[in-house]
Amino acid sequence: MGTRKREAPPPAQARAGMKKELPEQFRDYRHVWVFIELERGQVHPVSFELLGEGRRLADQLGVQLAAIILGPPGETTWHAVAEAFAYDADLVYLVEEPLLTDYRNEPFTKALTDLVAAYKPEILLLGATTLGRDLAGSVATTLLTGLTADCTGLDVDADGSLAATRPTFGGSLLCTIYTLNCRPQMATVRPRVMRMPQRSNKPIGRIIRHDWRMCEEEIVTKVVDFLSDGRSENANLAYADVVVAGGLGLGTAENLRLIKDLARTIGGDYGCSRPLVQKGWMAADRQIGQTGKTIRPKLYIAAGISGAVQHRVGVEGADLIVAINTDPTAPIFDFAHLGVVADAVSFLPALTDAFIRRLAPANRLKLVN
Ligand SMILES: Cc1cc2nc3c(=O)[nH]c(=O)nc-3n(C[C@H](O)[C@H](O)[C@H](O)COP(=O)(O)OP(=O)(O)OC[C@H]3O[C@@H](n4cnc5c(N)ncnc54)[C@H](O)[C@@H]3O)c2cc1C
């Protein structure tokens, strides 16, 4: 894949040389935990993706998979409990406390670090969302343990260590990072990097309710109100079934309406490559790629995008990639399923018109699995 190389991780034997004996106080750390992100009553889908990944790691290690749910007493928290079992958790650690209604770093860090201290997991996974990144960093620094952020691959080595792989050197290399001498081994993973597992009808199982208290007076941050940034429609780009994106090849900011028109016509969302964000042509939360969003749509149309490795890593999970580019040697044609060598500025309106004619009156693309 382009210039991206995976350095072979040192074999367990070689690492044994680097590895000091795991300190006594960490030896009884066991089981895999996934933090279930609840924001304003909704479970973030990345939590289910992590339960799928956590299941695989727990089975490899022969241990249990636990979901960690911190929330206010009531229906939304219990809905998250039921969903955690439906996505194959073996048990749920539950803290129900009104202070945990809206995310604030201090109470969530305290509750999660208290849980870790009480029940000792060997692996703790969180989504690399805004909330997850904030929480994972403070939990890792409070516990003085290692955290590998934005992982693209997780595995268990022969010696039972978590092998957390992530891009490095601007995405041109993948490195595998180990937390050898501390516990838990922590990792965050961005939404859509891991596959969504199948949901089952598994009934609610074992729940460990942890009695936890903190006083409002101990918390510096107060939630006063939620204000829209006027861009909340963007939130679904990572989970859209159809995405149309534009790159520098579109030439001007005005030409971005061509990808928006096509996206609207086929019931999709739109995004862009990084230089368009740098030019101020599109908002940062529309950027797709290594430092933007990872997407896994059924259909991805890239217009005027060269297919640099940092863009590729964000889109290669798409079922069908269609690239429109004037240069037949553009790297995007190395991984696109369908390629159109054409000027996107004239091809996009023609494609949109063709869809309008074909899809009328429904005007929506029906994609079959
Ligand atoms: C640390 C790091 C992180 C990065 N993160 C990201 C990221 O998250 N996402 C990302 O996208 N990039 C990222 N980049 C930047 C990345 O390396 C590329 O520079 C970027 O993706 C290129 O954007 P582009 O394809 O739009 O532009 P270009 O590379 O300039 O490509 C434009 C393409 O348009 C074609 N073209 C020109 N005219 C037309 C036309 N009329 N019709 C059709 N095609 C045409 C050209 O042939 C060319 O292939 C990152 C870089 C670094 C160093």
Image (cartoon, rainbow, N blue to C red):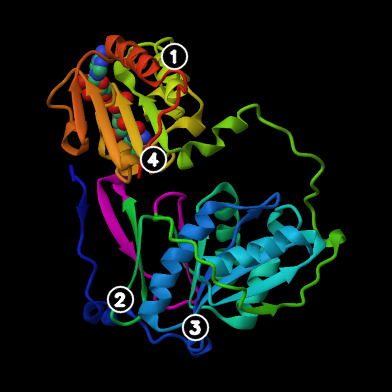
Residue 163 is tagged as: none
Q: Disc 1 or 3, which lies upstream in sequence?
A: 3
The local crowd at label 4, few if under 14, some if 14 to 19, many if 20 or more residues have their Cα within 10 Å, is many
Q: Is mark 4 within 8 Å of ligand 1?
A: no
Question: What whole-number distance in Å separates the C-alpha atoms at marks 1 and 4?
Answer: 21 Å
Circle number at residue 157: 2
Residue 174, horizontal then vertical, whole percent = 27, 54
The local secondary structure at tag 2 comes to: loop
CA distance for labels 4 and 2: 31 Å
Q: Is residue 184 visible?
A: yes
Which of the numbered marks, if any, corresponds to residue 257? 1
Please, what is the three-letter code of the amino acid marked with disc 3?
Answer: Arg
Q: Is residue 319 above or below residue 24?
A: above
Q: Count neighbours of disc 1 (C-alpha within 10 A) and say few if under 14, some if 14 to 19, many if 20 or more.
A: few
**What crowding class fits label 2: few (fewer than 14 Cα within 10 Å), some (14-19), or many (20 or more)?**
some
Residue in the image at 52% along x and 38% along y = 236
Q: Give the number of the disc on residue 30.
A: 3
- The residue identified by callout 4 is 297
Badge 1 marks a residue whose secondary structure is helix
Residue 6 place in picture, x, y as percent: 21, 56
- Viewer-proximal residue among 151 and 365: 365
Q: Amino acid at mark 4?
A: Pro
Question: Along the horizontal axis of the image, is 94 left or right of 243?
Answer: right
Ligand 1 under 8 Å from disc 2 Cβ = no
Asked whether the residues under the numbered discs 3 and 4 touch, taking CB atoms below 8 Å apart as contact, a structural biologist would say no
Q: Secondary structure at mark 4?
A: loop
* Cα gap from disc 3 to disc 2, whole angstroms: 15 Å
Magenta range is 168-193
